[in-house]
Structures are given as structure tokens and as C-alpha cells.
Image: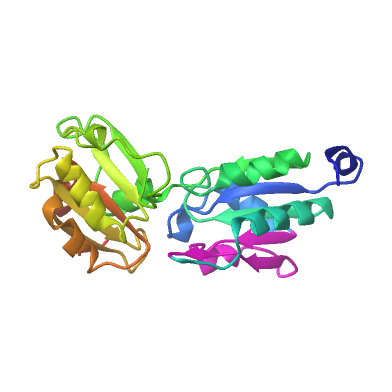
Amino acid sequence: MSINTHLDTELGFVSLVGAGPGDPDLLTVKGMRVIQAAQVVIYDRLVSAEILALASASAEKIYVGKQVDFHCVPQDQINQLLIDHAIAGKRVVRLKGGDAFIFGRGGEELEALAKHGIRYEVVPGITAALGASAYAGIPLTHRDYAQSVQFITGHLQKDGTPLNWSCLANHNQTLVFYMGLKQSGYIREQLLKAGLSEETPCAIIEQGTTPNQRVWRGPVAQLASLAKQAQSPALIVVGQVTQLHETLQWFAKS
């Protein structure tokens, strides 16, 4: 169908909702409201059962989760699901872990909706870097240790634009790698090659903000060996601020 044809029909509405990093209490009030009103909920792997349970019993729930090396539903099919249900006049919630605009492909999905003239809104969520580091007692910025923070995807595409590793190797900042366990050896190698000291402290936070949260710490030279102990979902945090975990941890002892 053409865009004009879609606009002539009674279209539904799509809410792109970030569910937060794991603890269901970190869902926003607006996120809760739109989930409860949804007729269709299209959700990812990292959305907790407690948050999914907020949806009406009559709502259609469609799982489209992804994990390393396995995509349950390809991205173009997810886009089409959103389009099809909106064209059918439904109130749709696209529910993602963390925040949909931080390595969540939220922008790609909204581009697909916009091409078809479908109305939408964005309900931000607490991204994993903020939630997991806070629950681990690791401030991402600190006047004494880090004046900036960078979020980096660990899904490093061989044919994509290469990272500026020399920029990442600055000592007075914090680096947060999403989805980086599998690439931890490469990340370590590139950071050291760019000049980062092998003694730079780092941490891996597994299942952050949940009762199963675990934290491993050590120098960046040991990053790959630390990663072997952790399981996805996990974040890699590199920088001096990770030393504060021992003093500031409050949620669970690792």
C-alpha cells in the first residue's frame, strides 16, 4: 500500500517503550500506563515477566526476542508486525529492555512507521548503563576520576565504521560496552594498543539491577578472563570509577 492509502484508513498508534534494565520497579509511570492500555504488546527477551504481566489479559503478546547469534524474528519482520497491527487500528506497545534509543534499534523501527504515516510516541526507559552501574555502586562520572562517559556497542561489525580507539583510550573517562562479552578479548587488545594502561580498572556487571546481579572487577589486561566468568546480559565498564564498587556497593555483595 502507498502512504496515502494508509493515511485514509483508521490507523492505530504505536508506543515505543523502554522497560528499564531488569528491576521491574524501574519502569516509568508512563510506561506502565501505556502497557496497561495496549491491545498488542510486541516484546523483547530482556523484558521481565513482572512488566509483561502489566498488560491486559486480553492483549495479544508477541515475542520477538534476540540473543547472541540467534534472532527469533528478523528486524524487517518486526518492523512489519508493527506496521500491520497499527494499520489494523490497534494500540501497539513495542516493549524493549533498557531504553529503546540506546542500542535498541528504536530509531530503525520508528523510521519504518514514519514511512507508512503511522503515529507513534517514545517512552524512554532507564538504559542498562545507568541502572546496572548505579546498582553496582559505580558512578559513571566523578569529579576525581571521570569527566565524561561513552556508551559503545560491543557488536563490532567487521564491515562497519571502525571505532576511534585512540579516543576511547583517554584515562579521564568511563567506557561502557553493551553486548561486549563475546568481543572482550578484541576490546582489551584494541584499548591496550591505543595506549590505555593495562592496569586501568574495569568491571563486568551481569544481570544488573536483578536479584541475580554479579560483579567482577580487575585490570583491563584481565578483561577477557573476567568475561569468561560472566553470562549475558552483562555490561563491561572500563575506568577508574569502577574502583568505587567496593566502597559504594549497596544492592548486593559480589
Q: Residue furthest front?
A: 159
Left or right: 65 in relation to 222: right
Foreground: 174 or 180? 180
Bounds of the magenta segment: 39-68
Left or right: 218 in relation to 62: left
Q: Residue at x 48, y 62 (%)?
A: 46
Q: Is residue 40 magenta?
A: yes
- Residue 115 location, quadrant: top right
Evaluate whether residue 208 shows in this view: yes
Left or right: 127 in relation to 221: right
- Residue 72 location, quadrant: bottom right
Evaluate whether residue 250 shows in this view: no
Q: Is residue 204 magenta?
A: no
What percent of the width, then of the height, locates residue 219?
A: 11, 52
Foreground: 159 or 74? 159
Foreground: 44 or 111? 111
Q: Residue at x 35, y 41 (%)?
A: 151
Foreground: 141 or 23? 141
What percent of the width, then of the height, locates residue 83?
A: 75, 51
What percent of the width, then of the height, locates residue 124?
A: 53, 43
Number of marks in the rendered image: 0
What percent of the width, then of the height, locates residue 97?
A: 49, 56
Left or right: 170 in relation to 59: left
Reply above or below: 254 against 137: below
Which part of the image, by quadrant, shows the C terminus?
bottom left
